[in-house]
Amino acid sequence: MLTIRNLGLQDYDITWQAMQRFTHERTTDTNDELWIVEHPSIYTLGLNGKREHLLTIGNIPVINSDRGGQVTYHGPGQIIIYVLLDIKRLNLGIRQLVNILEQSMISVLAQYDIFGLSRIDAPGVYVNDQKIGSIGLRIKKNCSYHGLSLNNNMDLRPFDHINTCGYSGLKVTQLSDLGVTVSSKELADSVTQAITAALLL
């Protein structure tokens, strides 16, 4: 059983604490959940994050998160789907879960005639060598939290002030810059459906 929650625009820190609490308190009988959310402008540093990748960040807050990966930016117009899954019960390895998240974004982009690719050396989804979707996960008690972000129609300028995902010069793109107009709700629903279908295989 998979529960899907649409949380709307939520503070990053509050949502992060809720994910930690959910994962800590869940049992082997707890339903898996997908949380659809957007965050106000914020930079997050993953467990491997180095502050040297924060360049000229101005007034945007920075938070040290417990997800994997380096530094990224979240803001309105970017869909985020947090995957709170019992990966042991689903018989999934971490790489398999990353692949499911990548392929879910790629399959949805294809619906809009956008050709997305994943890369072995750098998790996420890329279009014309520009990053459009990111993945960062944490595993505790054989359960995952955090998840994916996909750039839809947002202000991308804050990405110019960091080495996105720890890569100097990595450019970022979004659906609206690729000629696609879609609501964040419709986009998030499509990605959620793709993840759900993959998990039920």
Image: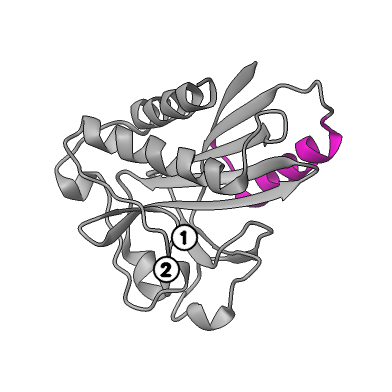
Mark 1 lies on residue: 73
User: What percent of the width, then of the height, locates residue 95?
Assistant: 55, 48
Determine the image quadrant of residue 91.
top right
Nearest to the observer: residue 8 or residue 116: 116
Q: Are marks 1 and 2 in contact (CB under 8 Å)?
A: yes
SS of the residue under disc 2: helix
Q: Is residue 162 left or right of residue 65?
A: left
Q: Name, please, the residue furthest toward the bottom.
A: 52
User: What percent of the width, then of the height, locates residue 1?
Assistant: 65, 16
User: What percent of the width, then of the height, locates residue 72?
Assistant: 48, 62
Mark 2 lies on residue: 164
> Measuring 54% from the left and 42% from the top, which residue is drawn there?
96
**Cα separation between marks 1 and 2:** 8 Å
Q: Amino acid at mark 1?
A: Tyr
Nearest to the observer: residue 137 or residue 79: 137
Determine the image quadrant of residue 18.
top right
Nearest to the observer: residue 192 or residue 88: 88
Q: Is residue 23 left or right of residue 85?
A: right
Using the image, tell me which numbered label, if any, was put on residue 174: none
- The image shows residue 157, relative to residue 189, as above or below, that is below
Q: Amino acid at mark 2?
A: Thr
What secondary structure characterizes most of the magenta part?
helix
- The image shows residue 47, relative to residue 140, as above or below, that is below
Range shown magenta: 8-26
SS of the residue under disc 1: strand
Q: Is residue 165 left or right of residue 117?
A: right
Mark toward the start of the polypeptide (1 vs 2): 1
Near mark 1 (Cα within 10 A), the count class, few <14, some 14-19 or many ≥20, is many
